Structures are given as C-alpha cells and as structure tokens.
Image: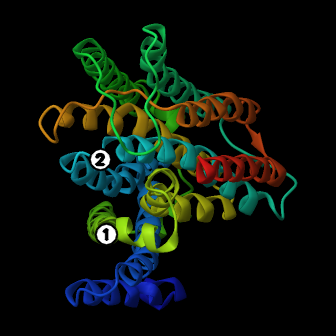
Amino acid sequence: MCFLIRPVYWLGLFTAVALALWSANAAPTLIFAASAVGVVPAAALMGEATEHLAARAGPGIGGLVNVTFGNAPELIIAIFALADGLQEIVKASIVGSVVGNALLVLGAAMLAGGWKRPRQTFDRTAAQTQSGMLLVTVVALALPAVLQLSRHDSLPGVGGVRHVFGSTLDHVSLAVALILIATYLGGLLFSLRTYRDLFNPAQPVDDVRSAWSVRRSVWTLAIAGVAVAVMSDLLVGSIEQAARDIGLSQFFVGAFVVAVVGNAAEHYVAVVAAIKDKMDLAVNIAIGSSAQVGLFVAPVLVLLSFLLGPSPMALVFNGYELAALLSVALIVPILLSDGESTWFEGFQLIALYTVLGIVFYFA
C-alpha cells in the first residue's frame, strides 16, 4: 500500500512504544509522550481515508464521517472520566474541543492553505449553516450557567470539585441535552437530504476515479479510529501523574492537552485539505466537529452521567469556560460570513486560542 511509505506513518513506531511502556508499567510521563506522538500516524491515516471518501461521497459526508471518528476518542475518554467522578475535567475537555476545533484547527487550516495564496474561497451558505449550528451550541451550553447565577449561586471552580446542584438544574441540563441531540439530528437531515447538493457537490471525475472505494475508506477509518482511541486511552491513563510531574493543572490539561490530542485527526485532515485548496472540506471538518461536540458529545455525556459516576453532570461551566465559548461565538461567524479566508485570518484565530491558553494556564 503506497501510503505506508509516507514519512508521517513512520511515527507509527511510537504506537508500539506506547503499548510496550504501558505493559512494562513505565513512568507515566514516558507513556504520555509516546502515546501523544502515537496519535499522529493514526490521525494521518484517518485523514487520507477521509479525503478518498470525500471524493466519492462529497465533502459533506466525508467531513461528517471524519468528525464522527475524530470525536470518538474524546467520547471514550470522557466516559472513563465520568465513571471516576471527574465531571469538571469532562466539561473542561468539552469546552477545549469546541474552542480548539473552531479556533486552532480552523485557524491552522486558513494559515496553511492561504500562506501562498492571496485568498481561498468556500461555499458561504454552507459555512453560515455550520456557524449557525455552532452559535446555537454555544448559547445552549451557556444558558444553564445563567440560571445558576440567577439563583444567586456561584459557578463551578477550576479545581475539579463539583458543586452540589439542585435537582432542578440537573433536570434542566437533561432537557437541554435532549434538545441539543434533536438539533444535531435535524442538522444531519438538513445537510444530507434537504440540501444535499449544497453540502455534497459533485466531485471532479479524475478525483473520483483515483479515489479508494467507499468500503476501503470506511474500513480504514474504522481501523484508524480504533488506533486513535487506544492511544488516547493510554494518554489519559497517564495524564494525571504526568501533569503533576510536569506541573500543569488538571483543568488546563482537560481543556487543552486532552482536547488537542483528541482532535489530532481533525487538525491533520483540515490542514491537509486547506493546503490542497479544499476549503469547503476544511471548514466542514473544523466547524462541524465543534458543533458535533456541543450538539452530540456533550449531551450524550449528560445522559450517561445519570448512569455513571456519583451524580448527574449539570451543564454549568465556570467563568473561564464561558468566556472561551462566547469568544468562539463572536469571532467565527464573522470570519466565515464572506465565504473567503486568508492566512492572516487564520493567524488571528490561532492568536486568540493562544491567549485563551495563557489565561487557562494561570486560572
């Protein structure tokens, strides 16, 4: 298979190294570093399969499949964290995923794709639909915190200790979760059926002929998704002790380290697509993944929290997390509104993400 000779797949050796270190009960910091690098080749393989699938089925379906497989490790990681009662860490990783995809992934794609081009274009209507779903996601995730503040109660802290909320807030979170899932399903119906031609335009004949079969692409995505999940599981299993050794707070680790590693697939695929001037696919992956985390992953975790862990997880975020979500809701729709992107717009998104990282680090 020709893709095995690509240099990025040589990093697959770290997958075996991470497994060997874990089996030998090595230092958590070593397992953490090896598993983080081991995610990269799996993400690259997922990216190549997604590219071929997009050529066959269109960027809409290709992007949908990619974000689904790309977000699977985050969901698996969060389920284990829920079972351990680490609800604030779970919520930090949710916010980190939404912010990371919308700012870091999209920003890196715009920067890499536009570096040697004056501008790149993408379908404005499709981008506005995606950003609209992202805006709904952010507002819905922020409103339970407004209810909490209106009751003169404080927001959760950043130390990983869950405040004891009343049953009313837990029930509100459950209702919001069900509405978000319904919105996500409605978005799928809209993009894959109602406006299928808009979100899945016809591909060039040469691209279709040279693409892998749909079956091969799906099987490759499945294998790569499992590899990403295994490496992510090792990463999280060692991250608590590694964070202490390195000197990072669990809040920062959940919001940035876990989110960045869990989104490695989206990072790679979106950037490669942008470099090849396929900005429709890049925008679909970056914004679609952010929306999927908020509309599907977060509410599913709320539902599972009624079965796992010591108590239900209320969708109430702390002040830092709310500020990060609102910053995404403000800047992303504005930058996508004209259907064009430049490298400087990507630079701005990455700069904002860096500022948020600094604030979260010292929180």
What residue would you read off at disc 2? 86
* SS at mark 2 in the image: loop
Q: What label does residue 139 carry, if any?
A: none
Q: Residue at x 39, y 34 (%)?
A: 192
Residue 11 falls left or right of residue 132: left
Q: Residue furthest right?
A: 118
**Looking at the picture, which amino acid does disc 2 mark?**
Leu
Q: Residue furthest left?
A: 307
Q: Nearer the viewer, residue 311 or 214?
A: 311
Q: Residue at x 52, y 21 (%)?
A: 139
Binning the other alpha carbons within 10 Å of mark 1 as few (below 14), some (14 to 19) or many (20 upward) gives some
Q: Residue at x 42, y 8 (%)?
A: 151
Q: Position of residue 291 (x, y in %)?
A: 47, 36
* SS at mark 1 in the image: helix
Answer whether residue 1 is visible to the viewer in this image: no
Answer whether residue 229 is visible to the viewer in this image: yes
What residue would you read off at disc 1? 220
Q: Position of residue 279 (x, y in %)?
A: 65, 50
**Looking at the picture, which amino acid does disc 1 mark?**
Thr
Quarter residue 23 falls in? bottom left
Quarter residue 34 falls in? bottom left
Q: Where is residue 52 in the image (x, y as percent from the top left)?
A: 44, 64
